[in-house]
Image (cartoon, grey):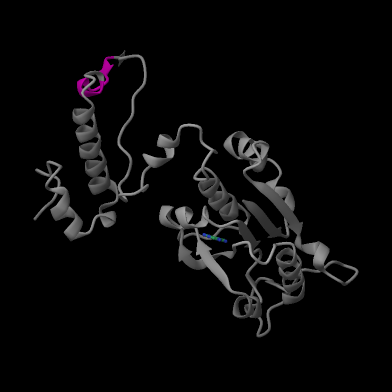
Amino acid sequence: MNIHIISVFPGAFNGPLDESIIKRAQNKGLVRFYIHDLREFTTDKHHQVDDYPYGGGPGMVLKPEPIFSALEHVISQIPEQASKQLIFLTPQGHPYNQRKALQLCEVENLVFLCGHYKAVDERVRDFWPMEEISIGDYVLTGGELPALVIIDSVIRLIPGVISDLNSATTDSFYDDNLLDCPYYTRPEEYRGMKVPGVLLSGHHAEIDKWRKQKSVERTLSIRRDLISPERLINLKKDVDLGGLVNE
Ligand code: ADE
């Protein structure tokens, strides 16, 4: 996968892409990053990327010309037959989730346009076929951190990036939109707190049942919105919902 990033603050990507699993993915040749400084696509001597909004009001607006040039440059580097997806990070975008991460990990070229300041000139959004994504209902200073969040969540799903494939397939939200269950490691008892006996039993069917039960309990308690009423009826077949839901 090739990941292209267009940003006014390219330095924001220096550290995070050079650590842990993302670094390993690059070393294995599974991901390549191309980071573009938006200022390099300006043509004036001050390298101005933003300007005052027409109509007044606080904040600055990213100018259209450098963004158009940057996107044209990036797209010219992508072979015509390769799949690509342009992504614009904005709090006004569609909410990001694991389903979207699974879709994006199939794309050969991801192009992230990071907003900054108050807004981007609306003509950028009108002209370019970009998927607009928000990572949550709060406002950050720019799209750099959201781009990193998406990149991290997508890269770990690329086959070969995580050595233990099961680790990604048992994540929260992976295929059943439930929060993940609790996990324990050694010691068996710590400060009087014991690992649940079923996990030590070696009965895989019982362990799976316990994990599903705990996943559903956790989801109902913290993210009730993830389980539709129809789903709840189905879950009743496998899970004891006694006391967890008011019917
Ligand atoms: N830029 C600023 N805030 C953002 C958010 N919550 N999601 C995506 N991009 C953003």
Q: Which residues are magenta?
A: 192-199
> Residue at 64% across / 73% down in the picture?
58
Please tell me whether residue 167 is drawn above or below residue 10 in the rendered image. Answer: above
Relative horizontal placement of residue 157, taking residue 71 as reference (left or right) = left
Relative horizontal placement of residue 140, taking residue 42 as reference (left or right) = left
Viewer can see residue 142: no
Q: Is residue 197 magenta?
A: yes
Give the camera-side residue of 234 and 245. Answer: 234
> Residue at 66% across / 82% down in the picture?
56
Return the x and y of residue 30 as percentages of the image width and height: 62, 43
Return the x and y of residue 163 as percentages of the image width and height: 50, 32
> Residue at 71% across / 44% down in the picture?
14
Please tell me whether residue 127 is drawn above or below residue 240 in the rendered image. Answer: below
Viewer can see residue 173: yes
> Residue at 15% across / 42% down in the picture?
239
Return the x and y of residue 162 as percentages of the image width and height: 51, 36
Q: Quadrant of the C terminus?
A: bottom left
In the picture, residue 127 is in which quadrant? bottom right
Please tell me whether residue 77 is drawn above or below residue 202 in the rendered image. Answer: below
Outermost front residue: 81
Relative horizontal placement of residue 113, taking residue 163 as reference (left or right) = right
Q: How many marks?
A: 0
Relative horizontal placement of residue 33, taking residue 21 as reference (left or right) = right
Return the x and y of residue 233 as percentages of the image width and height: 13, 54
Give the camera-side residue of 89 and 204. Answer: 204
Ligand 1 sits in quadrant: bottom right
In the picture, residue 108 is in which quadrant? bottom right
